[in-house]
């Protein structure tokens, strides 16, 4: 055992943080903001094997978000502030007399200030069999990894004990893993804390409609196991049984206060480390507790992240005041309780509750709107004087941001107007402009409407990103971003700034408007469009890097219909394309390019694999398998591209359009042909779709996948359009996304025949191409357009605008006009002449593009990018 | 891939816009111009790269009105020699190119980066004769 710092003050006083979750990380940031990381030694003991991550978004792991993407810890921040972070080494004992903490590894650290942020642990009811193989809790990334592994290996059915917030999250995860899912809730309704009976009923119907089985008003009596000791089912207290291979306990959490108990700190009767308004433990002024492990001065334990953040700020502010004034800092920040408002999307259902949701105040009245058909339930709690006290929204929580901000004041319109759906009675738009300045817009960061207005009027912010940066509003859970956008727009308009919705400095029209102009007037020339429809200042000019590729893409999408050149490098079109489209390859950081041949559906013959291997070997390319079931070859110089493609085209390959804003890939699982679970031939469908939509230029890239059964191995629900086989045909999902802002796709139509499926995708894609903004993926487009998914369904399924025939004929024209861009290029000497590094030295390679070996392949020689910019000695001009 | 370009009578020539003090010749002397390529090699709105005798690279552009510009081909933000492959445009009446890597824009006449005041790239004088 070693003592790394003397008891009490060293040269720099020491702060020890126990626990590195979201609240712990926020505490570290709050210390750094106050300069305390410079004046103090900061040591962090973290039990989990990874630094702080976004536990609120834990379930998004199953939507494709990796543990790395979930991280909220910037390791540069840790290093820059000299924070000593010990991962996987939990604190085990605290000696308050000696002021030391000892970790599992034996490390002992002396402290001046100790901050406990140990969070909570899942409550597992003490039922027989609770520790059997196949029983899990739902709290950490490790828990999720274990559930996923077990589910994939040996489960077809899963049961969740607990129908609260986390329980529904867990149920969503099990359903996402393809399990038949049960939910067991002891209370008579789902989410008993957040919603009332009516809200619970709406929620129940919607969740049952998704195919989940819900058992309410009954407890778990016993977990039943088989001969091998693994879970086979559950006995419930109502006498019934549920057969299940896997059980997830999600019946609430308890404060993790054992460490505090062991060292004699006062804890509450039902747990939680007792703290005062400054988040200091009531037993020891040198020790603080923050987040879910703390019992706040109002007698509550807060299980939400926003109050935890507030406690982190309070503790840091108190420590800073003590450090600066050597007083006890009681005049500083205080945490005296927090708003428990929440808005969640559980299993795709919006659920929100805010303020006094259950109407606990005296003399309060309810306004309730309930529509069991659509699964919508809305209740507002109104006070004696007409003030809004709180409410519950299930199924449609769009009004949450506005309503929460009005809480505590008398809304300017009758309360029933606030909950009636649009179109019922006189539609009332209750814009955020009617909110008082003190209304809280962002509850994560406590930002008022006044502060946001100030950002626009005093700090000259003109966009939502600028306002977010200036005020921090909208950077927490993000639920207020919509209201934020309305507020910024209305504030700009109020201050006389015209909000310009134009595409760029050259065009006052949106992309959609330009599309309509190009289509209606058959304009096939960018210059003609700019000179006739551009802004006055831009006419006759050279446009810009925003509108050129956008218009280039519109013209390419409509080429066969408007009589434009079909090939993206023909005529004037050539000058509009981004470098990737211009060289039909993907530019990489050192100026070299990568090449992706099309491998439809991910199906490839051994002969073609050999060709790719030979080409990569002969040209010394780095090869990597892509996420879309293709092979990417990196490190080609411009002048090599035609030589490489000559070989590929010869072997029967064609362009994969990895460089274009166009269809990338239609991924597939192996399907019914081989898989014992498959119900349709997913590979054939994927190939058909990829060949149909290849080369289609669109506002952004398009990704697709086809899964052969509900197990969803092709991850179709994370794609722009995803197809999942059913026993009766195909289900079509749209608007999914992976990447930085993952979104599960929405079901557009079910049990379609092959022909119905293709017709619907034709319409959907062409409607997207027609109406989306530049670089707007289907996921954001679907969220943005008025009416969302319902509107899209009306248009492409019900043909409410009467445009489906036109959409289909546009797609038919595209399919008929498709030609392989690379085959055309290598057969055209004029176009080939562009593929040189230097116009005056066509055979000289770019000396900046060089490579060095790594793991038996090449990688860019990055030092080459930093040298050679100076003139070479003695080579004066001749 | 080498192909014999069609030739016209006009050759594009370059020289540094601000001759260094060590350069002996005055700007009036014709032989400090370096011939690069035939005018027909340029497409309006697109660039080409040229290798200069001192090992530097220039990015050459032709705009819609037939004016030519040349700046250093090296993108100072990434170090890659790619500015010739960027898209050109007009910003407040002045010509620019946007780097194809991270989209910073450079004024084609002054070499100034429009998105970062502290960065400027070398410019060249261009003529066709």
Image: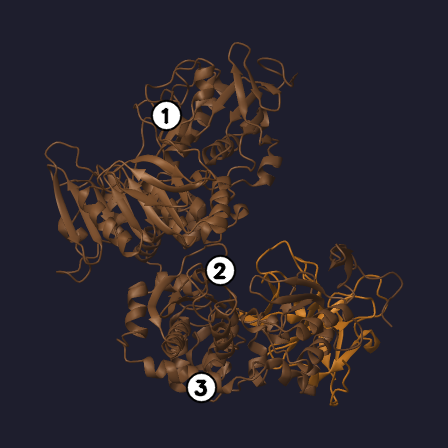
Q: Earlier in the sequence, mark 1 or mark 3?
A: 1
Residue A222 picture quarter: top left
Residue A337 picture quarter: top left
Q: Position of residue A778 (x, y in %)?
A: 42, 65
Instruction: Compute the Cα span from label 3 to label 2.
Output: 33 Å
- Residue A813 got which mark? 3
- In the depicted structure, whether residue A774 falls above or below residue A559: above
Identify residue for label 1: A334
Name the chain letter of the residue that bears numbered label 2.
A
Left or right: A581 with respect to A275? right
Identify residue for label 2: A713
For label 3, the SS is: helix
- Quadrant that contains the C terminus of chain A: bottom right
Give the camera-side residue of A214 and A475.
A214
For label 1, the SS is: loop
| Pointer 3 local density, CA inside 10 Å: few below 14, some 14–19, many at least 20 | some
Q: Earlier in the sequence, mark 1 or mark 2?
A: 1
For label 2, the SS is: loop
Instruction: Compute the Cα span from label 1 to label 2.
Output: 50 Å
Name the chain letter of the residue that bears numbered label 3.
A
Q: Which chain is brown?
A: A
| Residue occupying the point 59% across, 68% down | B96
Q: Position of residue A280 (x, y in %)?
A: 42, 20
Give the camera-side residue of A67 and A396.
A67
Image colour for chain B is orange
Give the camera-side residue of A335 and B70.
A335
Q: Nearer the viewer, mark 1 or mark 3?
A: 3
């Amino acid at each position: 055992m070693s003592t790394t710092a003397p008891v009490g003050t060293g040269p720099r006083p020491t702060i020890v943080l126990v626990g590195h979750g979201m609240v712990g990380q926020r505490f570290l940031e709050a210390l750094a903001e106050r300069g305390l990381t410079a004046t103090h030694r900061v040591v962090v003991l973290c039990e989990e094997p990874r630094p702080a991550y976004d536990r609120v978004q834990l379930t998004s792991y199953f939507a494709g978000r990796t543990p790395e993407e979930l991280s909220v810890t910037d390791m540069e921040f840790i290093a820059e502030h000299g924070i000593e972070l010990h991962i996987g080494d939990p604190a085990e004992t605290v000696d308050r007399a000696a002021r030391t903490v000892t970790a599992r590894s034996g490390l002992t650290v002396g402290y001046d200030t100790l901050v406990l942020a140990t969070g909570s642990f899942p409550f597992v009811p003490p039922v027989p069999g609770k520790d059997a193989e196949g029983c899990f809790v739902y709290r950490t990334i490790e828990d999720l990894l274990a559930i996923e592994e077990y589910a994939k290996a040996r489960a077809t059915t899963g049961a969740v004990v607990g129908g609260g917030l986390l329980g529904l999250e867990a149920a969503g995860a099990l359903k996402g893993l393809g399990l038949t899912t049960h939910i067991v809730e002891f209370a008579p309704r789902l989410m008993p804390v957040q919603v009332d009976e009516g809200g619970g009923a709406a929620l129940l119907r919607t969740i049952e409609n998704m195919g989940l089985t819900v058992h309410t008003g009954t407890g778990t009596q016993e977990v039943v196991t088989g001969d091998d000791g693994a879970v086979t089912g559950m006995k419930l207290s109502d006498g019934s049984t549920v057969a299940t291979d896997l059980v997830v306990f999600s019946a609430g959490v308890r404060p993790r206060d054992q460490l505090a108990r062991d060292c004699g700190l006062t804890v509450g009767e039902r747990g939680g480390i007792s703290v005062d308004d400054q988040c200091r433990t009531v037993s020891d002024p040198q020790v603080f507790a923050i987040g879910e492990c703390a019992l706040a001065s109002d007698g509550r334990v807060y299980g939400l992240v926003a109050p935890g953040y507030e406690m982190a700020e309070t503790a840091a502010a108190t420590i800073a005041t003590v450090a600066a004034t050597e007083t006890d800092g009681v005049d500083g920040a205080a945490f005296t309780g927090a708003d428990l408002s929440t808005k969640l999307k559980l299993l795709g259902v919006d659920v929100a509750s805010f303020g006094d949701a259950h109407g606990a105040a005296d003399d309060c009245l309810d306004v309730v709107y309930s529509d069991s058909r659509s699964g919508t339930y809305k209740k507002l709690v109104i006070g004696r004087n007409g003030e809004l006290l709180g409410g519950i929204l299930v199924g449609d929580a769009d009004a949450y941001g506005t309503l929460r901000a009005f809480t505590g004041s008398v809304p300017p319109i009758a309360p029933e107007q606030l909950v009636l759906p649009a179109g019922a009675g006189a539609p009332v738009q209750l814009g955020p402009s009617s909110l008082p300045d003190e209304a809280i817009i962002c509850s994560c960061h406590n930002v008022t409407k006044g502060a946001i207005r100030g950002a626009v009027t005093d700090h000259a912010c003109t966009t939502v990103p600028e306002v977010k940066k200036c005020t921090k509003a909208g950077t927490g859970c993000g639920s207020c971003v919509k209201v934020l956008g309305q507020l910024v727009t209305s504030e700009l308009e109020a201050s006389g700034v015209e909000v310009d919705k134009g595409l760029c400095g050259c065009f006052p029209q949106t992309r959609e408007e330009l599309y309509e102009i190009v289509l209606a007037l058959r304009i096939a020339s960018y210059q003609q469009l700019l000179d006739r429809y551009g802004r006055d200042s831009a006419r006759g000019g050279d446009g810009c890097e925003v509108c050129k590729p956008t218009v280039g893409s519109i013209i390419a999408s409509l080429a066969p219909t408007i009589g434009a050149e079909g090939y993206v490098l023909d005529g004037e079109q050539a000058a509009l394309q981004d470098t990737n489209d211009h060289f039909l390859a993907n530019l990489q950081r050192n100026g070299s390019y990568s090449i992706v041949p099309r491998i439809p559906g991910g199906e490839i013959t051994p002969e073609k694999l050999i060709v790719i291997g030979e080409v990569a070997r002969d040209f010394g390319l780095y090869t990597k398998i892509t996420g879309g079931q293709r092979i990417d070859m990196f490190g080609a110089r411009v002048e090599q591209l035609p030589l490489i493609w000559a070989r590929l085209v010869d072997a029967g390959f064609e362009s994969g359009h990895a460089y274009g804003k166009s269809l990338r890939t239609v991924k597939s699982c192996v399907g019914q042909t081989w898989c014992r679970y498959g119900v349709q031939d997913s590979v054939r469908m994927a190939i058909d779709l990829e060949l149909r939509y290849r080369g289609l230029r669109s506002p952004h890239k398009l990704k697709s996948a086809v899964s052969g059964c509900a197990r969803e191995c092709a991850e179709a629900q994370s794609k722009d359009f995803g197809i999942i086989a059913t026993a009766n045909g195909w289900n079509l999902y749209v608007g999914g996304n992976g990447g930085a802002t993952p979104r599960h796709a929405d079901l557009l139509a079910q049990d379609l025949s092959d022909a119905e499926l293709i017709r619907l995708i034709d319409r959907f894609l062409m409607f997207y191409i027609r109406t989306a903004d530049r670089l707007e993926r289907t996921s954001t487009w679907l969220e943005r357009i008025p009416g969302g998914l319902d509107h899209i369904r009306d248009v492409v399924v019900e043909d409410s605008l009467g445009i489906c025939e036109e959409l289909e004929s546009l797609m038919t024209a595209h399919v008929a006009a498709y030609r392989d861009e690379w085959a055309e290029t290598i057969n055209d000497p004029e176009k080939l002449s562009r593929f040189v590094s230097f116009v005056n030295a066509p055979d000289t390679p770019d000396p900046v593009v060089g490579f060095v070996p790594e793991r038996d392949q090449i990688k860019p020689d990055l030092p080459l990018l930093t040298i050679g910019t100076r003139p070479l000695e003695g080579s004066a001009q001749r | 891939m080498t192909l014999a370009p069609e030739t016209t009578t006009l050759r594009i020539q370059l020289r540094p816009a601000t001759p260094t003090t060590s350069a002996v010749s005055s700007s009036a002397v014709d032989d400090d111009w370096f011939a690069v390529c035939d005018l027909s090699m340029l497409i309006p709105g697109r660039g080409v790269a040229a290798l200069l005798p001192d090992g530097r690279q220039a990015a050459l552009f032709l705009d819609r009105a037939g004016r030519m510009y040349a700046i250093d081909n090296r993108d100072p933000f990434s170090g890659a020699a790619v500015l010739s492959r960027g898209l050109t445009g007009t910003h407040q009446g002045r010509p620019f190119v946007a780097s194809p890597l991270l989209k910073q824009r450079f004024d084609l006449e002054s070499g100034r980066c429009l998105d970062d005041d502290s960065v400027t790239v070398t410019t060249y004088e261009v003529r066709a004769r």
